[in-house]
């Protein structure tokens, strides 16, 4: 199963991204980062198309190194 | 017997749904929003985001541009000091509450900005022209209340918004007396809307909002923990967290969400009509008493606030005598030095302000008490 993890600049943007993707049938979940403070978004779908949606709505994110390349 | 006609200061009583939301928040949302990932923090964060969505939708904004504040004064300070941090010229209306006038005056006194005060007129066109005539090359922002907290006069805020857009100026609007009785949206031309949560939005005290369209950066006036990027000593730049250092007031936020839902369900127009009817009836009861001056002009529109004076009796004495009978009205200057200077009310005024829960018969009874003074 395709999976993609992006780090989010805040809980607010993480939640906004989660809702944007969920409303388009893409499963995504806000998770606490495993190290340090902050939140990430776990996307259970193709990374490129999911991130395209976030780009379209101007939602900032940081791609994790180990994440699937977009 | 307590009859509150000081709802412009803070609405009381609060709707049952707001009381319920407060109790629920105490029971369920005991975590710290936007911090931590455990179940309590997660539930609280989710609830606060949901409140952000409710506010954003109500004002036609985005959740990430919706900032929770302590009150309207806090929001106005953030907006004014944040937008004017690099200096420039600012115009404020001659009806501004001290919450806008004082931070602007402080910046001017420190030589950080130049400041002009635009006189306000009953006619909208004259007021807009008053602002236009003061605009110069260096003008960065106009601050204008949507409705005066002293007289209730509704400012030509949409026209001021158009003027600001035309000139590339940031429009900061104070919605403290308008939100909940007028349908205020950012699309009215407002770049930054500041308002209280505890007045017409029926939240509890200690709540306020700054809602922005994100066009004009707001430099934070308070730095601190935001729950993100914690190893950096630099304040994050993205709203809302950049402007929400420290733990947010979850209980107040949830009360505000419930309050906005109450207003939406009831209908802004319906609330306005109810309160406006009470004000008009109140004025009718007073109009035959020649000793009483009501500060309203036929050329202007008003939110449900009536300011008045009784000749020969100081405003504070009127309010004190009413208080003895259980009527709660605010007298004096209402923290609005500019407005009273412009109105020429050197002793201030007595302010009558109903809420959605006020009753016509109570206003009529109050008027009859006033006539016997």
Image (cartoon, coloured by chain):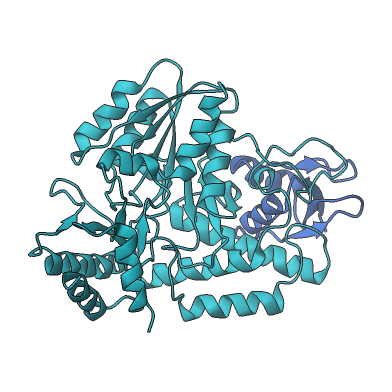
Q: Quadrant of the C terminus of chain B?
A: bottom left
Q: Residue extending furthest front?
A: B312
Query: Is any part of residue B109 visible from this angle?
Result: yes
Tell me the blue chain.
A
**Residue depicted at x 44% and y 76%:** B13
Task: Residue B285: give x, y in percent of width and height.
Answer: 13, 69
Toward the top, the furthest residue is B137
Q: Where is residue B304 in the image (x, y as percent from the top left)?
A: 28, 61
Give the chain ID for the cyan colour.
B
Q: Which of A65 and B356 is in front in this view?
A: B356
- Of residues B288 and B236, the one nearer the viewer is B288
Q: In this view, does B310 lie to the left or right of A56?
A: left
From what the image shows, is residue B165 above or below residue A64?
Answer: above
Give the residue displayed 49% in from the left and 63% down from the top: B198
Quarter assignment of residue B136: top left
Residue at horizontal 52 percent and vertical 23 percent from the top: B113
């Amino acid at each position: 199963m395709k999976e993609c993890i992006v780090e989010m600049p805040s809980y607010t943007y993480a939640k906004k991204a989660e809702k944007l993707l969920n409303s388009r049938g893409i499963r995504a979940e806000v998770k606490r980062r495993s190290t340090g403070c902050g939140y990430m978004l776990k996307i259970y779908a193709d990374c490129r198309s999911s991130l395209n949606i976030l780009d379209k709505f101007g939602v900032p994110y940081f791609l994790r190194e180990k994440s699937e390349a977009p | 017997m307590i009859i509150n006609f000081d709802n412009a200061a803070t609405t009381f009583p609060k709707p049952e749904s707001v009381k319920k939301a407060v109790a629920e928040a105490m029971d369920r949302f005991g975590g710290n929003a936007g911090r931590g990932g455990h179940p309590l923090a997660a539930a609280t964060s989710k609830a606060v985001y949901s409140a952000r969505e409710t506010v954003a939708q109500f004002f036609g904004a985005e959740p990430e541009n919706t900032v929770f504040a302590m009150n309207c004064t806090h929001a106005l300070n953030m907006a004014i000091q944040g937008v004017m941090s690099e200096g420039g010229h600012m115009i404020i209306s001659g009806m501004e509450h001290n919450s806008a006038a004082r931070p602007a005056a402080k910046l001017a006194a420190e030589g950080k900005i130049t400041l002009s005060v635009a006189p306000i007129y009953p006619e909208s066109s004259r007021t807009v022209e008053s602002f236009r005539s003061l605009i110069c090359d260096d003008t960065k922002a106009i601050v204008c209340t949507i409705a005066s907290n002293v007289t209730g006069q509704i400012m030509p805020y949409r026209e001021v918004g158009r003027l600001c857009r035309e000139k590339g100026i940031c429009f900061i609007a104070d919605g403290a007396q308008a939100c909940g009785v007028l349908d205020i949206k950012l699309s009215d031309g407002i770049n930054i809307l500041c308002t209280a949560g505890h007045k017409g939005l029926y939240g509890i005290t200690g709540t306020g909002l700054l809602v922005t369209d994100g066009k004009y950066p707001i430099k934070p006036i308070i730095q601190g923990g935001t729950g993100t990027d914690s190893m950096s000593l630099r304040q994050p730049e993205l709203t809302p967290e950049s402007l929400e250092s420290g733990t947010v007031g979850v209980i107040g936020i949830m009360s505000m969400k419930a309050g906005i839902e109450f207003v939406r369900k009831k209908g802004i127009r319906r609330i306005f009509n109810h309160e406006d009817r009470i004000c008009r009836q109140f004025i009718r009861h007073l109009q035959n008493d020649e000793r009483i001056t009501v500060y309203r002009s036929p050329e202007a529109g008003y939110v449900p606030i009536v300011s008045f004076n009784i000749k020969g009796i100081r405003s504070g004495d009127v309010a004190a005598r009413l208080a003895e009978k259980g009527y709660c009205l605010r007298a004096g200057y209402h923290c609005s030095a500019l407005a009273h200077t412009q109105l020429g009310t050197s002793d201030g005024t007595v302010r009558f302000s109903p809420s959605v829960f006020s009753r016509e018969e109570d206003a009529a009874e109050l008027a009859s008490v006033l006539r016997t003074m």
